[in-house]
Image (cartoon, rainbow, N blue to C red):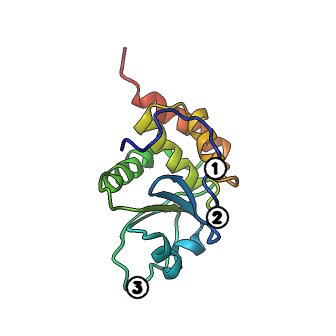
Amino acid sequence: MSNWPSSPSVQTPYPARPSGASEILPRLYVSDLSFAENPAALVSLGITHILSAMRGFVAAPQGLHIHRAQFPLEDLPFSELAAHLPGTTAFLRSALHDPNARVLVHCMEGVSRSTSVVCAFLIAEYGWTPAQAIQFVKSRRRSAEPNMGFVQQLQEYADSLRPAS
C-alpha cells in the first residue's frame, strides 16, 4: 500500500477513462451502472471486484470471475448510509489487500452513493476528514457529489472511528 497517498493532496486528476470509470487510487475505480454491466469495459480495466452501492438488479456480466458485493443504498439525504460503511470499507480493504485486485465501486450514476463509499474508505484507511476525502475524490472524478445527508453521515462515521478519550 506504499503507493497510496499518505495525505489528501490534490494533484492533477487521473485522466478520465473514455468508458466512464475514474481511477481514484491505483486499482480503485468509480463508475456508473452502465460501465459496471459492460463486460468489455470491465475486462479493459482488469476488474476483479465490484461493489454495487445501490438497490435493484445489477446485470452481472456472465463468464467473468469477479467477486461481488451489493449494498442496498438509495440516493436520498435521509437514506441510511452509515450503517453500511463498515461493510463497504471491509470489502474494499480486503479486496485491495491483494496486489493483483482491481476494484470498481459503482452506483446508478457514479455521483453520490459510490463516491460516498469511497470517501468512507479513505477516512477509515488514512484517517482523513470527510472534507479531505471528498476533495480528493472530486479531484479524480469531477462529477463526484455526495448528497448532504451522506456528507453528515461520513462525519458520523469518521467520529465513530476515533479512539475514545
Dividing the picture into quadrants, the one containing residue 148 is: top right
**Can you tell which mark lies on residue 62?**
3
Relative depth, front residue between 39 and 113: 39
Regarding residue 119, the answer to whether it shows in the image is: yes
The image quadrant where one finds the N terminus is top left
The residue wearing badge 2 is 109
Mark 1 to mark 2: distance in Å? Answer: 19 Å
- Within 10 angstroms of label 2, few (less than 14), some, or many (20 or more) residues? some
Amino acid type for the residue under numbered disc 3: Gln
Could you say where residue 69 lies in the image, as x and y percent from the top left? Answer: 39, 64
Amino acid type for the residue under numbered disc 1: Pro
Relative depth, front residue between 125 and 163: 125
The residue wearing badge 1 is 13
Could you say where residue 47 lies in the image, as x and y percent from the top left? Answer: 43, 69
Q: Earlier in the sequence, mark 1 or mark 3?
A: 1
Assign a secondary structure to mark 2. loop
* Image height of 112 relative to 58, above or below: above
Amino acid type for the residue under numbered disc 2: Glu
Residue shown at 40% from the left, 47% from the top: 89
Viewer-nearest of discs 1 and 3? 1
